[in-house]
């Protein structure tokens, strides 16, 4: 419990940087479904890899490919399902209510 409560600042900084990364990518790509899925995949990979290597640098985790793979696969599956559902819902709202969303 002590290890994870000491990493609150690290995760806050990672989420802050990830927000800028996603905003940059969203402005660089169109609002097409495949580009949004690509952004989700890149963001998850960036977050999981940076989180994993920061844990290794601080000494709270030893290098283990299986642990990294499981973290990436689990995050990708759940976040891709969420992204597909959210993209579909936002497209439905855009067409039905004529609402525009800006990133």
Image (cartoon, helix red, strand yellow):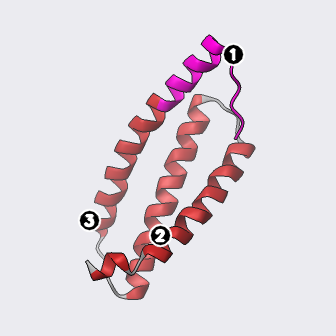
What residue sits right under mark 3 in the picture? 66
Q: Is residue 52 a member of the stretch shown in magenta? A: no
Callout 1 environment at 10 Å: few (<14), some (14 to 19), or many (20+)? few
The magenta-colored residue range is 86-103
Residue 70 screen position, x and y as percent: 28, 58
Q: Which residue is mark 2?
A: 11
Position in image of residue 50 (x %, y %): 49, 70
Q: Depth check: give the residue in front, 73 or 14.
A: 14
> Does the CB distance between marks 1 and 2 fall below 8 Å?
no
Q: Quadrant of residue 17?
A: bottom right
Q: Nearer the viewer, residue 50 or 20?
A: 20
Q: Secondary structure at mark 2?
A: helix
Depicted 79 relative to depicted 50: above or below? above
Q: CA distance from mark 2 to mark 3?
A: 22 Å
- From what the image shows, is residue 68 above or below residue 7? above
> Residue beneath label 1, please?
98
Residue at 55% x, 17% y: name it.
92
Observer able to see residue 61? no
């Amino acid at each position: 419990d002590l290890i994870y409560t000491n990493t609150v600042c690290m995760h806050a900084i990672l989420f802050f940087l990830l927000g800028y990364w996603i905003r940059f990518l969203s402005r660089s790509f169109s609002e097409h479904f495949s580009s949004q899925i690509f952004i989700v995949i890149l963001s998850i990979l960036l977050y999981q890899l940076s989180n994993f290597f920061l844990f290794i640098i601080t000494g709270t985790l030893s290098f283990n490919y299986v642990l990294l793979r499981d973290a990436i696969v689990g995050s990708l599956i759940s976040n891709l399902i969420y992204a597909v559902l959210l993209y579909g819902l936002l497209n439905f709202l855009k067409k039905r209510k004529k609402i525009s969303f800006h990133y």
